[in-house]
Image (cartoon, rainbow, N blue to C red):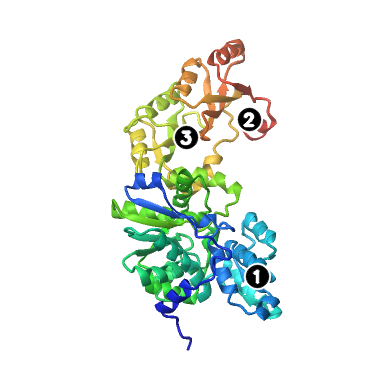
Amino acid sequence: MKKHLQPADYLKKILTARVYDVAVESALEPARNLSRRLHNKVLLKREDQQAVFSFKLRGAYNKMAQLDREQLARGVICASAGNHAQGVAMAAHRLGSRAVIVMPVTTPQLKIEGVKSLGGEVVLHGDSYSDAYDHAVGIAEREGLTFVHPFDDPDVIAGQGTIAMEILRQHQGPLDAVFVAIGGGGLISGVASYIKAVRPEVKVIGVQMSDSDAMMRSVASKKRVTLQDVGLFSDGTAVKLVGEETFRLARELVDEFMLVDTDAVCAGIKDVFVDTRSIVEPAGALAVAAIKQYVAAKKTRGETYVAILCGANMNFDRLRFVAERAEVGEEREALLAVTIPEERGSFRRFCELIGTLPGGPRNVTEFNYRISDAARAHVFVGLTTHGKGESAKIAANFTRHGFEALDLTHDELAKEHIRHMVGGHSPLAREERLLRFVFPERPGALMKFLSHMRPTWNISLFHYRNQGADYGRILVGLQVPKADDKVFASFLETLGYPVVEETANPVYRLFLRS
């Protein structure tokens, strides 16, 4: 029977781990803005600033530094979604060893290029870590390579545990909890092993994505559970089956487990950026998202928490998604479907109502409308909120004033797809002219537009999305009789907003014009 290492064994292994040939003692920085908002002190452990932008090089190097010359000469192999891969590639480069890295085909290109730049030989296989792992084990057996496990290895666990050693050395005052992202469990196993040996009163709280919660399910079931599928937004923690040793350690040592969703993680990425001007990957923001959730649930004040920012290997093109979902994750934006009677002045009445909502005026973050029915119109609207739980109240207020409203703030279909698909051909949009405006982002800009319009002109299409600039780009369809051409030209000149007419645009004619 395999003998398990005891807490004293792990403490010794962490204290003697060889990590500083490649790793640095990362900073422990206060998140001042987040701390002020939460009324608790939040410290960020900046593992995103390591040479490979992740903590993973600690465990990888510590494991490989224990290998003999013959093993290093034959080479090493690993399976990884990216960060461990870069750690192994860097360690192999430093130790003069060949490194074969098996990565899921879903791995961000940034991480693939990072491995190649460090001399690693990349093999892409499968959709998740578990698929890549099975393939890597087969290659290791065929070619006699030493497998460097990303989490289920005592030397790897000990390497990651040096993070906890640094945290307790860097922060001498009160410390209530350390929040740690969990994929396979190597990081939290190392962190918990050290903290519980040295300062057992400090809570260790594990954090998982709601769609990749293998460790949490395993602990609840008292045995390792294999997930059929894992969410890939946080690719660094997308693990179907946690390790045997990491499961044992997490089950014994971790005080609490938490789940966070995609929107909360996006909001966490934004929180880190606001405080540090750095962008972490989704896995790197799990701990921050969990701290916010923890404070909201337990109503704590004056406590001290550490969030380990475990990685920053983010593909640039994912930032569009993150920025859009961050506002919803913070519930700073309410998304609503509102039904408006298709009658003269109703659009203006609706806009005026937005300005008189309870709690003060709201900025419109998005507005999608396309004429489709002679009796009523459905609009998709986004509004800023002042705090959590307001979207349902806003929807109820619209309904009370005669505009039937449906709260879509937590509707995945609406957030992911429908907001981009409001539109289409309409036989009712006769004599329509399409105009692309640039409005200043200030109160009253839209009302100025509406008040200058002739009562006989009808808005048949409206699309606006706030992009965070000091101006907004707006697409408007207006039904203007041919006889009003001169008056319409005068209207545009008086308005004074930059405008481009798109009525002849082939894209408009193909997708929107009947």
| Residue topped by disc 1 | 95
| Residue topped by disc 2 | 513
Name the N-terminal-most of marks 1 and 2.
1
- Asked whether the residues under the numbered discs 3 and 2 touch, taking CB atoms below 8 Å apart as contact, a structural biologist would say no
Look at label 3 and name its amino acid: Thr
Residue 327 percent location from the top left of the image: 45, 42
Numbered mark located on residue 365 in the image = 3
**Crowdedness of circle 3 by 10 Å Cα count: few (<14), some, many (20+)?**
some
Disc 1 to disc 3, C-alpha distance: 53 Å
Kindly indicate the quadrant of the structure image that contains residue 398.
top left
Name the N-terminal-most of marks 3 and 2.
3
As displayed, is residue 431 above or below residue 273? above
Residue 275 percent location from the top left of the image: 45, 45
Numbered mark located on residue 119 in the image = none
Seen in the image, is 93 located left or right of residue 214? right
**Crowdedness of circle 2 by 10 Å Cα count: few (<14), some, many (20+)?**
some
Residue 201 percent location from the top left of the image: 31, 66
Look at label 1 and name its amino acid: Leu
Q: State the residue at coordinates (60%, 71%).
A: 133
